[in-house]
Amino acid sequence: RIPLVIDTDPGIDDALALLLAIASPEVDLKLVTTVHGNVELAQTTENALRVLHLGGRADIPVAAGARSSLVHPQAERAGHVHGAAGLGGVQLPPSPAALDPRPAVVALADLLLSSSEPVTVASIGPLTNLALLLGVFPEAAERIGRLVVMGGSAALGGNVTAAAEFNVWADPEAAQAVLTAGLPTTLVGLDVTVPTVLTEAGIARFAASGPVGATAASILQQYLDHARSSYGTPGVVVHDALALTEAIVPGTLGTVRRSVVVDTTLGAARGQTVVDRRAVSTAPNAVEVAESVDSAAAVEFLVERLEWLSRS
Ligand code: BDR
Ligand code: CA
């Protein structure tokens, strides 16, 4: 089983990603670190604790990380998408577990330095914690076996601005530091997440499979309504769950090695991932950019795992 850390800002699709990891025997979720992003840090942290409890895994440590981005504070949170408290207006029961007293970067460094096997880190929020890890514990960052990042886009433009995807836009300086650090990184951007739509029929399947699935479906309801009214789509894009699928089953996505830099200027392109798609890169700090996906298979994987978790 692959040792796994999830760095997250729950967030509706983050919640599904956490449940997916819990439901997947290929990985051993050893630590969850939280970051500011969709909502404030105190709320993302509380949400992470509660979602793990919902999934029956309150034993997994949760350590709180950065409360704001490295340089410029994030202009706005994403309460209009995820609900003011981040989980689509659903109040989950509190977890009996206490927060890990260590700051996220310390917990992450401890785990990376003590693990006998390569650890996969899935980053599904702004990249602030990972950038801090690189700055404070570079020897621990070097031990990351695989970094799977939900963020950016290669050809599709942005979702929060015309140019930028939310996680990169929320802390472009951190994203630039992480994506050019030469870590073994797979970048899962909007190019592959946006076509991967979890439909109402899929949601209905895990909703019917037991209380955990029913709660997951209720968390998705507001997100579904938002998607229906904003884009007219008959389902939701669960970005973070797709990134987790790639972390759980490496090779789920078709990737190409590319040079990527992040626009950190203060203009209209701030937070854009500038992906050099002219050629396959041989640069040591290039990253694997996800460019193809079997969306139907990915959605089926998620639905089946959530059904299984609800039944067990
Ligand atoms: C990303 O932004 C957040 O709102 C989602 O949780 C996901 O991580 C998608 O752009
Ligand atoms: Ca997220």
Image (spheres, rainbow, N blue to C red):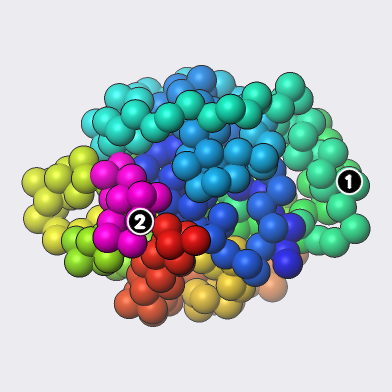
> For the residue with label 2, is its CB less than 8 Å from the closest atom of ligand 1?
no
Which mark, residue 11?
none
Mark 1 crowd level (few <14, some 14–19, many ≥20, 10 Å Cα): some
Mark 1 to mark 2 CA distance (whole Å): 39 Å
Percent position (x, y) of residue 205?
27, 65
Residue in the image at 17% along x and 43% along y: 226
Q: Is residue 304 magenta?
A: no
Instruction: Judge whether 219 appears above or below 90 on screen.
Output: below
Task: List the residue tagged with mark 2.
Answer: 210
Is residue 228 visible in this depiction of the protein?
A: yes
Start-end of magenta stretch: 207-219
Which tag, 1 or 2, sits closer to the chain's start? Answer: 1
Task: List the residue tagged with mark 1.
Answer: 113
Main SS type for the magenta part? Answer: helix
Closest to the observer, 102 or 214: 214
Count numbered badges in the picture: 2
Closest to the observer, 182 or 201: 201
Instruction: Judge whether 195 appears above or below 132 on screen.
Output: below
